Image (cartoon, rainbow, N blue to C red):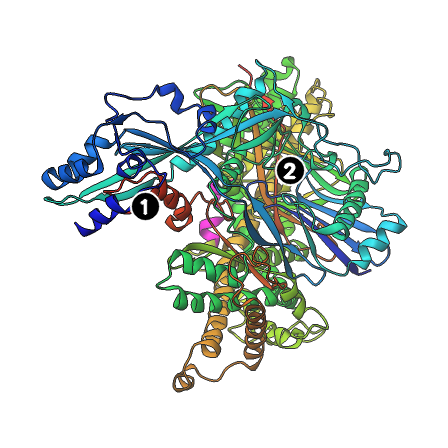
């Protein structure tokens, strides 16, 4: 099985969308999501099933990689048709996670002494384990009130990665986290709480590995959890 | 004096800002503002600007002819005349012809960057407040309009369905009291604040006949003004989508310059920065990302004309270096993969000493107060209240009599030192080091930081069958070391990467070495306590769809739960400690190896592109593979440059060709990558030009601009 075409959806910072559709010579395709354009708090890979017409269109485009800049309109009808086909194929992956990590945030207890205890959760889904490493220095905790940003703080240095309820380590700090489908784990840490904050979310950043079979190397990812209210 | 005479006497029909030139229209000079100031409200009203298309405020006049003014000037100097004629507030509307720009922001099937033309419509209002400052205001009209969310490719879509995201029908006014109004106005204000925060100041000088010229500093404040009427005059229009509509590119709702979303979902973009970037376009400043080499050179000549030639040459060398490094990344990684067994075997051979050290650390760490407390807290939360009094005894038993430090430490080390785990850890770290080395920005004198973006067409040359595959493989083998041969010990030169990593474990047993510092009771206790704290968090607040665990009700179950938690946490603490020990050991070696390679590339690039023939012998005998790679990349860059030579910053706007490129560049400022909010004085040339043309008085020299940051 070898790759015959590659398509990237990318935008520059601060949106930093990064999705890659890889089409293989056996007719199947994988979508690697490193920074979702669908605004999902999930990273990983999805199995796509292109129909014959789209497959023909995509493979005929050549090895590429061809990049789609989401901030600018496609150039000409041919590129527009190619982008539409790639979009359709990528959309088929929504219901078929291959190896996906979904992030959530929870607060533990009420704030005390100006500090909030935050639990960052990861849940694995798909057909195989998702593998990634966190970059705490590039991650942050974001506080909002009435829908408006109030402030943000860095994720502190972390002594250990994600841990299951049974205290089994999933990894994620200084080594890859390997999260099997259905497994979940938490990272708990304390952060100073900006005055007036009503809700919290976490911007998770790191490196996603093994997203595509012919590209096991780690590549940068970013995802943001949905926000949750802060008790008390 | 001669200059002054010609300026005052020579302009008889100019329609400029207030001052002697304006006065010549009717042979009268305007009155000082102090006695006839226009109503303040009118100054901020966009409608009044529309009624004043020349951009000149209607001003009252005073009986002072040009000759009178000249006489006063001769007698008392410019300052006296200026103070007699100046009004504190002058406003002009700036509306430039549409400007085009060329961006290499597309990629073709060969992986090269291709260009497209874009258009912007600069328009704003500029107010001079005497000698105290300048205010630039952009009026933004916020409206309501739906977008098409039906995919025209869907067989069920009606015939003639437009592309996803197309704005449908006519825009309508956002109702008064709608929360969108305040929200959008806030973002627009923040965008302007970003610009005000850059510290832009206009620097000028007023001529004085009998004394030193008066230096002037006019700080520029940027503001925005929101308007909501469909027919209102504005400099830009933005559709604001209500909270009931979630931004989602797949569903026809991408966030862009003309469409803002109150409900961003989990979208992490910052509208403030996006809006600030678009604010720059309304000031007439083009994008500075996805630029060809020719475009960046044109930018260099704009920003620092004096040093541009030498800076361009240095940038070309840096570009070739990045091209070579990018082309080598995959071959280097593949070579390490091939040679990996040599490395992992060497590290795995050190397991006995690491296990022994870890067992001692576990024995000391497990009895720490932090571990004890974390375990008690978790068991208390997981158990029925009736078991509370027994928890302390259970914990004490599990961390003392029932704790097998050797077995658990051994299992943790085995997991961390497995060939698979080590292989992933080492390869990941090497790949990140290679990516980091090739992705940092370069400082370009006179311009600022610039990222060099090497396209897939370059990396494709070293893939299997590629034109540079053979020399790249040669360089990779030389840098990393030979691959492992089944049944035979690998013989790697001592300078190679695998030889250096393989030599690391021999240093671990020395007193004061990394093993002693990184594997001890305190480190182990911290990791074990943190593991237990995370487990408690996962139990207390599970993710959506996971039911809370049932409480432990029986003492036997409590013992079993405690045993499982202690064993798992200790195993994980050992594994993490082992992984971090390896991480700390290998990263400096990998960084040094990549740095050495980068140095070799730089030396070869300098030899090929810079060194005079006389200096070549001092550089020694070149590596023929490295020479081949550098020459190949230099040839590609030169071909790109030749094809675009003389096409300037906006080739497509000038009707010229814009051939595909192997490399693009992005300035790391507000109009480039948006990674910083940096602005340069040369970007404001048009704005200063408008000021000098419309708001500078006759007695002032042309203003220049200063940017603080």
Vertically, is B538 above or below B692?
above
Question: In the rendered view, does B285 fall on the left or right side of B471?
Answer: left
The segment highlighted magenta reads: B515-524
Q: Residues within 10 Å of mark 1 (few under 14, many from 20)?
A: some
- Asked if residue B522 is among those painted magenta in the image, a careful observer would answer yes
Q: Chain of mark 1?
A: B
Disc 2, SS:
helix
Tell me residue A107's x, y (percent). 57, 23
Q: Residue B653 in the image: state x and y as whole percent.
A: 57, 55
Provide the major secondary structure of the magenta segment. helix
Q: Residues within 10 Å of mark 2 (few under 14, many from 20)?
A: many
The residue wearing badge 1 is: B706
Please report whichever mark, 2 or 1, sits nearer to the chain's N-terminal start.
2
Disc 2 + disc 1, Cβ < 8 Å:
no
Quarter occupied by residue B300: bottom left
| Figure check: A198 above or below B488 | above
The percent coordinates of residue B257 (x first, y second) are 58, 37
Which residue occupies 50% across, 19% down?
Answer: A111
Residue at the (43%, 29%) spot, across then down: B52
Examine the image and state in which quarter residue B156 appears: top right
Q: CA distance from mark 2 to mark 1?
A: 62 Å
Foreground of the two, A200 or B401: A200
Asked whether the viewer can see residue B425, the reply is yes
Looking at the image, which is closer to me, A148 or B160?
B160
Residue nearest the viewer, comparing B139 with B68: B68
Tag 2 subunit: B
At a point 47% along the width and 62% down the height, the residue shown is B297
SS class, disc 1: strand
Q: Give the labeled residue for mark 2.
A: B568
């Amino acid at each position: 099985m070898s790759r015959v075409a590659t398509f990237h959806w990318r935008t520059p910072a601060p949106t930093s969308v990064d999705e890659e559709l890889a089409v293989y010579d056996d007719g199947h395709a994988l979508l690697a999501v490193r920074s979702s354009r669908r605004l999902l708090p999930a990273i990983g890979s999805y199995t796509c099933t292109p129909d014959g017409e789209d497959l023909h269109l995509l493979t005929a485009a050549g090895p590429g990689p061809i990049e789609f800049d989401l901030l600018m309109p496609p150039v000409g009808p041919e590129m527009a048709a190619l982008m539409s086909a790639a979009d359709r194929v990528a959309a088929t992956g929504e219901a078929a996670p291959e190896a996906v990590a979904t992030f959530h945030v929870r607060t533990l207890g009420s704030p005390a002494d100006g500090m909030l205890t935050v639990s960052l959760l990861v849940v694995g889904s798909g057909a195989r384990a998702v593998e990634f490493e966190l970059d705490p220095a590039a991650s942050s905790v974001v506080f909002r009130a009435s829908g408006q940003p109030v402030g943000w703080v860095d994720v502190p240095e972390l002594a250990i990665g994600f841990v299951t309820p049974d205290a089994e380590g999933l990894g994620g700090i200084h080594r890859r986290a390997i999260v099997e489908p259905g497994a979940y784990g938490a990272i708990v840490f304390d952060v100073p709480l900006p005055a007036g904050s009503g809700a919290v979310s976490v911007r998770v950043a790191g490196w996603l590995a093994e997203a595509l079979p012919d590209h096991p190397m780690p590549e940068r990812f970013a995802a943001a959890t949905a926000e949750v209210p802060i008790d008390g | 004096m001669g200059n002054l005479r010609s300026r005052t006497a020579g302009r008889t029909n100019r329609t400029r800002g207030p001052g002697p030139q304006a006065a010549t229209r009717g042979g009268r000079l305007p009155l000082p503002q102090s006695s006839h100031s226009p109503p303040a409200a009118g100054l901020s009203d966009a409608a009044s600007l529309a009624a004043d298309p020349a951009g000149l405020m209607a001003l009252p006049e005073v009986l002072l002819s040009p000759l009178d003014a000249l006489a006063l000037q001769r007698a008392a100097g410019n300052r006296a005349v200026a103070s007699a004629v100046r009004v504190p507030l002058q406003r002009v509307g700036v509306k430039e012809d549409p400007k085009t720009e060329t961006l290499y922001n597309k990629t073709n099937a060969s992986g090269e960057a291709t260009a497209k033309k874009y258009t912007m419509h600069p328009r704003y209002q500029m107010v001079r407040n005497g000698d105290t400052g300048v205010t630039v205001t952009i009026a933004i009209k916020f409206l309501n309009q739906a977008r098409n969310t039906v995919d025209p490719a869907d067989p069920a879509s009606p015939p003639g369905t437009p592309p996803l995201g197309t704005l449908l029908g006519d825009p309508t006014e956002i109702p008064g009291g709608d929360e969108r109004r305040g929200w959008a106005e806030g973002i627009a204000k923040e965008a302007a604040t970003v610009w005000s925060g850059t510290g832009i100041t206009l620097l000028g000088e007023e001529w004085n006949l009998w004394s030193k010229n008066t230096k002037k500093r006019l700080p520029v404040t940027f503001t925005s003004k929101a308007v909501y009427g469909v027919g209102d005059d504005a400099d830009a229009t933005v559709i604001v989508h209500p909270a009931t509509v979630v931004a989602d590119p797949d569903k026809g709702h991408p966030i862009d310059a003309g469409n803002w979303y109150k409900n961003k979902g989990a979208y992490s973009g910052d509208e403030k920065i996006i809006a600030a970037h678009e604010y720059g376009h309304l000031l007439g400043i083009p994008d500075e990302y996805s630029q060809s080499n020719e475009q960046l050179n044109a930018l260099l000549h704009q920003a620092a004309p004096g040093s541009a030639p030498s800076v361009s040459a240095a940038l070309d060398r840096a570009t070739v270096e990045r091209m070579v490094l990018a082309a080598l990344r995959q071959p280097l990684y593949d070579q390490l993969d091939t040679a990996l067994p040599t490395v992992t075997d060497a590290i795995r051979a050190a397991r006995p000493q690491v296990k022994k050290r870890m067992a001692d650390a576990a024995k000391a760490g497990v009895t720490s107060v932090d571990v004890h407390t974390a375990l008690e807290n978790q068991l208390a939360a997981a158990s029925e209240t009736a078991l509370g009094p027994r928890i302390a005894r259970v914990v004490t038993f599990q961390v003392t009599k029932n704790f097998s430090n050797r077995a658990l430490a051994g299992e943790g080390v085995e997991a961390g030192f497995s060939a698979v785990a080590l292989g992933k850890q080492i390869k990941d770290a090497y790949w990140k080091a290679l990516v980091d080395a090739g992705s940092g920005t370069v400082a370009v004198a006179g311009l600022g930081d610039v990222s060099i973006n090497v396209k897939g067409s370059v990396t494709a040359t070293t893939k299997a069958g590629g034109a540079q595959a053979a020399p790249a493989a040669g360089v990779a083998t030389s840098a990393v070391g030979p691959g492992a041969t089944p049944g035979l010990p690998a013989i790697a030169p001592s300078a190679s990467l695998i030889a250096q990593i393989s030599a690391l474990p021999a240093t671990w047993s020395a007193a004061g070495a990394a093993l002693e510092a990184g594997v001890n009771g305190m480190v182990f206790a911290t990791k074990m306590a943190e593991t237990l704290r995370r487990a408690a968090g996962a139990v207390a607040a599970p993710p959506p769809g996971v039911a809370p665990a049932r409480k432990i009700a029986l003492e036997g179950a409590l013992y079993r739960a405690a045993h499982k938690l202690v064993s798992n946490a200790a195993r994980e603490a050992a594994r993490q400690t082992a992984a971090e020990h390896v991480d700390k050991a290998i990263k400096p070696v990998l960084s040094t190896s990549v740095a050495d390679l980068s140095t070799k590339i730089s030396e070869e690039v300098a030899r090929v592109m810079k060194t005079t023939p006389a200096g070549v012998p001092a550089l020694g005998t070149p590596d023929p593979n490295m020479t081949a790679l550098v020459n190949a990349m230099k040839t590609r860059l030169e071909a790109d440059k030749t094809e675009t030579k003389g096409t300037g910053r906006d080739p497509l706007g000038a009707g010229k060709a814009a051939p595909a490129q192997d490399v693009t560049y992005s300035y790391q400022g507000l109009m480039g990558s948006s990674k910083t909010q940096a602005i340069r004085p040369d970007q404001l040339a048009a704005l200063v030009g408008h000021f000098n043309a419309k708001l500078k008085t006759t007695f002032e020299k042309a203003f220049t601009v200063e940017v603080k940051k």
